[in-house]
Image: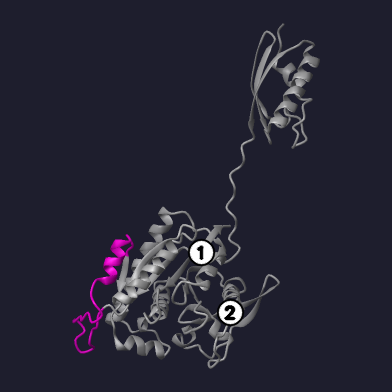
Amino acid sequence: MSFSESKIKEALSFVIEPDLKKDIIELKLVSNIKFEGEKINFDLQLNNPAMHNKKRVTEACEMHLNRILKTTVILTVNITPIPKAPETPKENKVLPNVKNIIAIASGKGGVGKSTITANLAIALVKKGYKVGLVDADIYGPSMPLMFNVEHEKPMPIEVNGKNLIKPVESYGVKLLSIGFFANQDQAMVWRGPMATKALSQLFTEADWGELDYMLIDLPPGTGDIHLSLVQTVSVTGAIIVSTPQKVALIDARKAIGMFKMESINVPVLGMIENMAYFTPEELPDNKYYIFGQDGLKSLAQENNIPLLGEIPLVQSIREAGDAGRPAILQENTPQAIAFNSFADNLIKAVKARNENLDPTQKVEITNMNGCSTN
């Protein structure tokens, strides 16, 4: 007996795909039809090729073929699942217009992390980038002082019918800090959940607009704020700040370890050594390594992480920060040159990271010892 492909398709048009509720011919789920004598075989895709579905659909095919072709066919059906369309990456609803989010961390306090962050932000602005800065050091916010805006108050702004916070702007940097929302003499006595909620609001309830870089000045150590950060936003990478002495390097190693945890997996873009050497004002070409030499360089090499720069120990850096006019603004000084070199190296590190690695995924914190991806 001779069949035609059109007759076979006519018979199969009476077979309904169980989940999609349309016939398998209309859905174009049948392919590679072959027939010889009473033998018929073809490929068939099903939304759910579980055993009971396979059996049910095969029996329906056989019944309608026998009915339309008026014979008893010998049927072979190769059933496979309908290919799933690749998932579209979820839109980053938090900071969708921020290209790069950089966390700046240190294992211990007192290494000048906030000073590094403030000068880096202004260095990037001077190079033509749009920059925002979040002072995430909930318990010791210092950015309002360093940017000479400690008496400013962020104003509310309505965007698309939603009330948001408008960041304060200074030296071209958009800035938000918990320090803006508390009196200068008020101690931040907050439990972990309160602190992390406050940090989240600085990202989710502010009008940051379009930014090339958002720098996040984290508190020292490895704790709730750090975990809350990687839960709230997709961090492009981290910078570890340390001074040269061994006690600081021990804690810097812990900070590297936190970001490298498999469950967090934030790339460490590099390390920056603060107070690397002392340069007297009257002897600007001299370097005295009073805290030790090459300690951070060795740690960076050991972890295969770039050393992004060395910032000298210069009294005017501290004085400039206290005066609300960061040292990077003092053109052609050794410290300004060092900060500009650091910014250049960071830009290269971010470019290399974005070219060679997938975007960082936010993580869902389940407990202090483990995380699971969203």
* Residue 191, label in figure: 2
Q: Nearer the viewer, mark 2 or mark 1?
A: 1
- Secondary structure character of the magenta stretch overall: loop
Is residue 332 something one can see in this rendering?
Answer: no
Q: Residue furthest top?
A: 1
Q: Position of residue 168 (x, y in %)?
A: 54, 82
Q: Quadrant of the C terminus?
A: bottom right
Callout 2 environment at 10 Å: few (<14), some (14 to 19), or many (20+)? few
Q: Is residue 280 magenta-colored?
A: yes
Secondary element at image label 2: loop
The residue sitting at 38% across, 80% down in the picture is: 112
Q: Residue at x 59, y 83 (%)?
A: 154
Nearer the observer, 114 or 335? 114
The magenta segment is 277-306
Residue for badge 1 = 369
Q: Residue furthest bottom?
A: 185
> Residue at the location (71% across, 72% down)?
161
Q: Would you say residue 2 is visible in this rendering? A: yes
Task: Where is residue 292? Give x, y as percent.
Answer: 24, 77
**How much space separates mark 2 and mark 1, taking CA atoms?**
19 Å
The disc, 2 or 1, on the residue closer to the chain's N-terminal end is 2
Is the N terminus in the top left, top right, bottom left or bottom right quadrant? top right
Other residues around mark 1 within 10 Å, as few (<14) / some (14–19) / many (≥20)? few
Tag 1: residue type?
Asn
Q: Are marks 2 and 1 in contact (CB under 8 Å)?
A: no
- How many labels, in total? 2
- Kind of residue sitting beneath label 2: Arg
- Residue positioned 76% across, 34% down in the render: 18
Residue 231 location (% of width, % of height): 55, 65
Query: Is label 1 in a helix, a strand or a loop?
Result: loop
